[in-house]
Image (cartoon, rainbow, N blue to C red):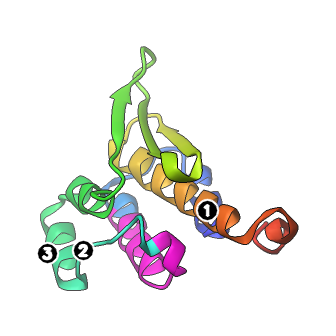
């Protein structure tokens, strides 16, 4: 998850294909994630993801994935898209911004939150294992 989040951060101006690929990969990662993460994020079935990607409805994939925790999205005065996800029971809140793509911001926020859940589940002694 850490590598995926790093990849999201390196992409500065994603195009539609980049976003679709990121969302698809995120769903694959979440399907393989520890139970602590899957308790909060449940991506749609692979067949549903494929249909939504085909139609260009990437945001719908991400909204369905965050159905259990919710997601707040907004635009900053600068025009940047910002997505925030909070998991109050774990005292986790993560945001991610993108210069022009709400789906990119949503993907980054999901990845950052999932990484926070993993870190919370492992505890401080094991944090070096995920860095």
Position of residue 70 relative to residue 50, above or below, is: above
Left or right, 20 with respect to 25, comes to left
What is the CA distance from the residue labelled 3 to the residue labelled 2? 11 Å
For the point 25% across and 83% down, which residue is it?
46
Query: What residue is rendered at 47% in x and 44% in y?
Result: 86
Q: In the picture, residue 77 is in which quadrant?
A: top left
Instruction: Check the picture and name the quadrant holding the C terminus.
Output: bottom right
Is disc 3 in contact with disc 1, using a CB cutoff of under 8 Å? no
Q: Quadrant of residue 123?
A: bottom right
Q: Nearer the viewer, residue 128 or 89?
A: 89
- Find disc 3 in the rendering and name its residue: 51
Query: Does dot 3 land on a helix, a strand or a loop?
Result: helix
* Residue at 26% over, 54% down: 63
Residue nearest the observer in this picture, 103 or 89: 89
- Of the image marks 3 and 2, the number of the one nearer the N terminus: 2
Residue 62: image quadrant is bottom left
Q: Position of residue 29 (x, y in %)?
A: 48, 78
- For marks 3 and 1, give the CA distance: 27 Å
Q: Position of residue 74 (x, y in %)?
A: 35, 29
**Residue 30 lies in magenta, yes or no?**
yes
Q: Is residue 106 above or below residue 39?
A: above
Residue placed under numbered mark 1 in the picture: 115
Question: Which of the two labelled residues, at mark 1 and mark 2, occupies the earlier sequence position?
Answer: 2
According to the picture, the residue beneath numbered tag 2 turns out to be 44
Q: Is residue 124 left or right of residue 27?
A: right
In the rendered image, the quadrant that contains the N terminus is: bottom right
């Amino acid at each position: 998850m850490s590598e995926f989040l790093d990849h999201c951060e390196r992409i500065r101006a994603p195009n539609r294909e980049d976003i679709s690929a990121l969302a698809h990969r995120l769903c694959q990662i979440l399907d393989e994630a520890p139970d602590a993460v899957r308790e909060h994020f449940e991506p749609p079935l692979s067949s549903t993801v494929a249909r939504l990607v085909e139609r260009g409805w990437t945001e719908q994939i991400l909204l369905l994935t965050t159905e259990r925790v919710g997601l707040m999205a907004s635009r900053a005065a600068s025009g940047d898209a910002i997505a925030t996800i909070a998991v109050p029971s774990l005292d986790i809140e993560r945001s991610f911004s993108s210069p022009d793509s709400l789906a990119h911001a949503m993907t980054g926020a999901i990845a950052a939150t999932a990484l926070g859940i993993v870190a919370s589940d492992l505890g401080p002694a094991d944090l070096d294992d995920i860095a």
